[in-house]
Image (spheres, helix red, strand yellow):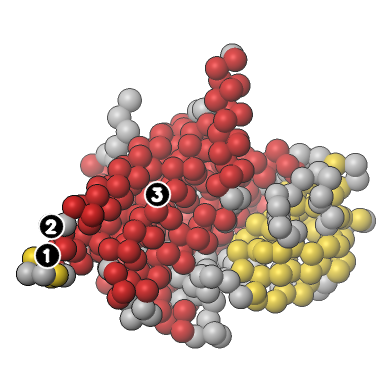
Amino acid sequence: MNFDYSDDQKFLKGEARKFLDARCPASVVRGVLDDNAKSYDAELWQAVAEMGWLGTAIPEAYGGLGLGHVELCAIAEELGRVAAPIPFSSTVYLFAEGVMLAGSEAQKSALLPKLAAGELIGAVAVSEGPGAATPASLAAEVRDGKLYGTKIPVTDGDVAHCAVVLAKDGKGASLFLVDLTGAGVSRATLKSQDPTRSVARIVFEGAPAERLGAVGEGFDLIEAIYDRAAVLIAFEQVGGSEKCLEMAKAYALGRYAFGRTIAGYQAIKHKLADMYVKLELARSNAYYGAWALNTGAGELPLAASAARVAGTEAFWFCSKENIQTHGGMGFTWAVDCHLYYRRAQQLGLMVGAARLWKERLVRQLEQRNAA
């Protein structure tokens, strides 16, 4: 078992890095951050679509490249390095995976080719406020094919064209496809810590809803979708963590204090070493998750939980220590450290807080040990 990229995958990863270094410097991220009217960079989104990345794991029969999830993980890592201000994760990790997992042939044929071509932005709407959605707390419901309720926050919900929505369906809960540009839908962009990945409040007042998957399987399907997304997001977190370590190291080697570089001081050495350890732990768990996802292994829930926990902790820690290594300059708007601190917070909450994933990891380990 080789937990590493193949030569072809390394080539793909290298080409993705060259492309993003050229097309997504920090100025592109700041362009979205500084412009209240922009929720993402449309030019970068179109360029990524032209590269075929949106269809990396989508079968060729539906307009995708049909490569696989490991290749998608490699691209995700590079997107994380540049904190790309595009709705990639919502569209590809969540929406597309949901359609591929539970969609009918007609739904796949209608949605996946548009998604792969960059003509459709997707989102997944589960949360209805603070705390995890549960059968007892779920309020949104579908009656006679119409959806009623409020979802908040929905990542990229203000720019998405279509959403997978979790809602009550009789005595249980199911997933539904809803056209966010159609009747019965109103949206509002919310203030957030990372405006380069927008969030929205979506109110459904009789919006037409098409069931996705079997009746009553909503929570099981969302859990499966989140497992897949958690692995892919973990690679974005690894990419972001690696970039933070590189930034901190470069600054420490170039900053002088009392006649020597600050990299020579033990306190800074310890910071960089701790960042490296967190990063490599997250990377190893992410590789485990990629293997489980790509092979459809039964270990995916365990591997996804481990990747999610390690990735979230690594990115938060590295983004924080990057600021600390930069000292007083690290807290200023002029230095790029805050771009990664913002993104670490956003990704850390996107498919559920770390606390929930830690609890899930413990349950998975207990179940495995009891078997």
Contact between labelled residues 1 and 2, with CB atoms less than 8 Å apart: yes
Residue 76, percent from left and from top:
40, 54
Q: Where is 15 relative to 135, above or below? A: below
Q: Can residue 344 be seen at all in this image of the molecule? A: yes
State how far apart marks 2 and 1 are (Cα): 6 Å
Contact between labelled residues 2 and 3, with CB atoms less than 8 Å apart: no
Per the image, label 1 sits on a secondary structure element best described as strand
Per the image, label 3 sits on a secondary structure element best described as helix
Q: Quadrant of the C terminus?
A: top right
- The residue type indicated by label 3 comes to Ala
- The residue type indicated by label 2 comes to Gly
Residue 221: quadrant of the picture? top right
Residue under label 3, please give it. 314
Residue under label 1, please give it. 261
- Give 61 or 183, whichever is nearer the viewer: 183
- Point 42% across, 64% down: residue: 341
- Give 136 or 56, whichever is nearer the viewer: 136
Q: Earlier in the sequence, mark 3 or mark 1?
A: 1
- Give 345 or 218, whichever is nearer the viewer: 345
Q: Where is 341 relative to 166, above or below? A: below
